[in-house]
Image (cartoon, rainbow, N blue to C red):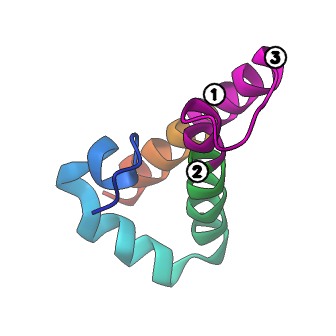
């Protein structure tokens, strides 16, 4: 597992099999996962000062990550 906080494994530890199943069966869901990972990596890079972002830019990324996490949770709930 990655040392990056807020990975999908940390956020949805009991639903990794469901995430994988949806990822391979739903291209749109797979794109959401890809974007979540990308946004999460950008936030982590900013937090660790690898990339410097303005407070506003980092805040916007955090809001986007939350919206993506909500979309993932909603898709998992609908798939049950």
Q: Is residue 22 above or below residue 54?
A: below
Distance from disc 1 to disc 2, alpha carbons, whole Å, reads: 11 Å
Q: Would residue 55 be found to the left or right of residue 41 on screen?
A: right
Residue at image mark 2: 41
Q: Which mark is residue 56?
A: 3
Q: Is residue 60 found inside the magenta-colored segment of the image?
A: yes
Q: Residue furthest top?
A: 55
Determine contact: label 3, label 1, CB under 8 Å.
Answer: no
Q: Is residue 35 above or below residue 17?
A: above
Image spot of residue 44 (x, y percent) = 55, 41
Q: Earlier in the sequence, mark 1 or mark 2?
A: 2
Q: Which mark is residue 75?
A: none
Q: What stretch is highlighted in magenta?
A: 42-66
Distance from disc 3 to disc 1, alpha carbons, whole Å, reads: 10 Å
Image spot of residue 57 (x, y percent) = 81, 26
Determine contact: label 2, label 3, CB under 8 Å.
Answer: no
Determine contact: label 1, label 2, CB under 8 Å.
Answer: no
Q: Which of marks 2 and 3 is nearer the N terminus?
A: 2
Residue at image mark 1: 62
């Amino acid at each position: 597992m990655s040392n990056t906080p807020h990975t999908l494994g940390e956020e949805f530890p009991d639903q990794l099999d469901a995430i994988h199943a949806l990822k391979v069966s739903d291209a749109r869901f797979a794109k959401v996962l890809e974007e979540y990972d990308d946004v999460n990596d950008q936030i982590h890079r900013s937090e660790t000062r690898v990339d410097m972002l303005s407070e506003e830019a980092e805040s916007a990324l955090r809001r986007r990550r939350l919206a993506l996490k909500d979309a993932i949770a909603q898709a998992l709930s609908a798939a049950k």
